[in-house]
């Protein structure tokens, strides 16, 4: 099969979160199984762009409403990522340093989608599947079927994967002319709650819809930022396929981001050395358990609970543990976490920002990782943590429910709590400290989690079966 993934992110080209990891890995494994998987994404000004060689494969001219623009499609020359990578350059619109966060993101991603469809329409053959990811690319199924200029593409099968339903890409009807002339009888396929909702449109128009874990799919029918009724209605074409992890990028025995590598046989010494390095850098105590949080500092991830849960832990459990936080996001959470540095007695620190290398070192050196998420479509942090022998302390929701079993249960290996509250989280931290003190039990759990397999193999097969259907 020939599969075209269209996405706003793809690791290592540009990544803001789990979407980038998935789109950087899934096509690679599909290619390994003998399929042709390609990724098309916007050309941002990233290091990857400047450090690699490119050839121009297409130049086109199209329009976003009344604004006509040239676009260029370039292809990475050496197949460095294990699949064909194409970048779409739209001068002045996409070629910026950040992926998101500009006032004209609606225009940027709509123009990107129009360019992708326009490019596909110039192909001499049709791909078997166009697989779009999240709202930034979710108007493509509609465009392929209902734009007059692209009628010849209407038969192409499309799949939408929802990595996060909280972000839907709403735009007003005043922007409906951004979509190339379309059959106005089909307005209902763009609309949700009186506006154009790209994610809802993707759910309505894609041939199949997937989410990144079975539990998240079930939860979305109850709560999906306004889309629950639509997901209930369309449930016949929806399925939940758990993400895998790229076990070549995420491997403690070869990781390019730190020196002290380890295998299951050397996990205790290996983790201790990485922990000492971290503790030295961040002024922490390597004799105490190191508990971390890595991720976006937003309510969805339960990051607002962190400051109080850490303070309560110090107060009620005692200063028996270290905390190290890596993340960025909501300014009020960032500033409270920074202020708390003043209260540290060599047992708390925070790094505000995005740092891929540091995240790898923390997965390697930490004893526990906290994920008090309110919503967690799949969650990759707990999977990376498990791969690095770090025990996850998670809220029982979405993909965390599907991947972490409490160590108190049969075959369990993590710590799970039910509510996104300071009390539940502090209790989870208390259990982590207790577990740390029982060193034989902790070592046994570490040995077992290193045997778990969350690689892509099973998930890739599920995607291929879905395409075939
Ligand atoms: P999200 O909802 O943010 O996509 P996921 O758990 O699916 O959450 O993926 C998060 C990914 O982003 C992981 O690879 C994690 O290590 C990475 N990440 C998040 N925040 C940071 C940060 N501040 N620095 C480095 N990596 C980060």
Image (cartoon, rainbow, N blue to C red):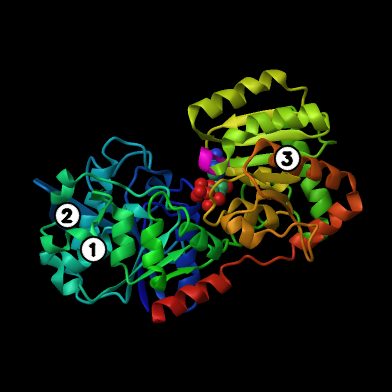
Start and end of the magenta stretch?
Answer: 295-300
Q: Nearer the viewer, residue 389 or 371?
A: 371
The dot on residue 158 is: none
**Mark 3, residue position:** 291
Mark 2 / mark 1, whichever is N-terminal: 1
Secondary structure beneath disc 2?
loop
User: Quarter of the image containing the C terminus?
Assistant: bottom left
Q: Is residue 199 magenta?
A: no
Q: Residue at x 23, y 47 (%)?
A: 90
**Mark 1, residue position:** 142
* Tag 2–tag 1 contact (CB < 8 Å): yes
**Mark 2, residue position:** 179
- Find residue 129 and report its image quarter: bottom left
Secondary structure beneath disc 1?
helix
* Tag 2–tag 3 contact (CB < 8 Å): no
Mark 2 / mark 3, whichever is N-terminal: 2
Query: x%, y% of residue 44?
Result: 34, 45
- Seen in the picture, residue 280 relative to 25 is either above or below; the reply is above
Query: x%, y% of residue 276?
Result: 78, 37
Q: Residue at x 21, y 60 (%)?
A: 188
- Find residue 319 and report its image quarter: top right
Label 3 – label 1 distance at C-alpha? 45 Å
């Amino acid at each position: 099969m020939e599969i075209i993934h269209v996405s706003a992110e793809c690791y290592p080209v540009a990544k803001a979160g789990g979407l980038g990891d998935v789109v950087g890995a899934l096509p690679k494994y599909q290619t390994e199984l003998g399929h042709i998987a390609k990724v098309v994404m916007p050309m941002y000004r990233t290091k990857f762009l400047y450090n690699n060689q490119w050839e121009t494969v297409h130049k086109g001219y199209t329009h976003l409403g009344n604004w006509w623009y040239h676009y260029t499609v370039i292809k990475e020359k050496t197949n460095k990522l294990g699949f064909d990578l194409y970048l779409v350059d739209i001068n002045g619109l996409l070629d910026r340093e950040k992926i998101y966060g500009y006032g004209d993101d609606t225009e940027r991603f709509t123009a990107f989608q129009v360019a992708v469809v326009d490019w596909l329409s110039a192909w001499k053959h049709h791909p078997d599947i166009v697989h779009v990811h999240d709202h930034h690319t979710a108007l493509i199924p509609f465009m392929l079927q209902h734009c007059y200029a692209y009628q010849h593409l209407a038969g192409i099968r499309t799949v939408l994967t929802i990595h996060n339903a909280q972000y839907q890409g709403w735009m007003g009807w005043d922007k409906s002319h951004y979509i190339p002339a379309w059959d106005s009888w089909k307005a209902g396929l763009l609309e949700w709650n009186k506006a154009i909702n790209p994610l809802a449109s993707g759910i309505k128009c894609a041939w199949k819809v997937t989410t990144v874990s079975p539990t998240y799919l079930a939860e979305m029918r109850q709560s999906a930022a306004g889309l629950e009724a639509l997901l209930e209605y369309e449930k016949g074409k929806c399925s939940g396929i758990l993400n895998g992890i790229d076990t070549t990028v995420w491997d403690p025995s070869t990781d390019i981001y730190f020196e002290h590598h380890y295998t299951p046989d050397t996990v205790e010494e290996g983790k201790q050395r990485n922990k000492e390095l971290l503790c030295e850098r961040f002024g922490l105590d390597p004799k105490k358990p190191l508990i971390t949080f890595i991720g976006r500092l937003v309510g969805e991830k339960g990051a607002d609970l962190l400051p109080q849960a850490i303070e309560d832990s110090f107060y009620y459990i005692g200063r028996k543990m270290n905390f190290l936080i890596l993340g960025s996001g909501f300014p009020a959470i960032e500033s409270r976490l920074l202020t708390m540095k003043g209260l540290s007695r060599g047992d708390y620190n925070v790094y505000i920002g995005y740092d891929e290398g540091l995240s790898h070192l923390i997965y390697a050196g930490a004893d526990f990782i906290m994920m008090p998420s309110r919503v967690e479509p799949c969650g990759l942090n707990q999977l990376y943590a498990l791969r690095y022998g770090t025990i996850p302390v998670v809220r029982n929701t979405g993909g965390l429910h599907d991947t972490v079993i409490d160590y108190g249960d049969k075959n369990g290996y993590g710590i799970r709590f039910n509510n996104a509250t300071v009390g539940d989280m502090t209790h989870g931290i208390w259990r982590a400290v207790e577990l740390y003190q029982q060193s034989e039990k902790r070592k046994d759990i570490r040995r077992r989690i290193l045997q778990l397999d969350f690689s892509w193999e099973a998930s890739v097969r599920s995607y291929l079966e879905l395409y075939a259907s």
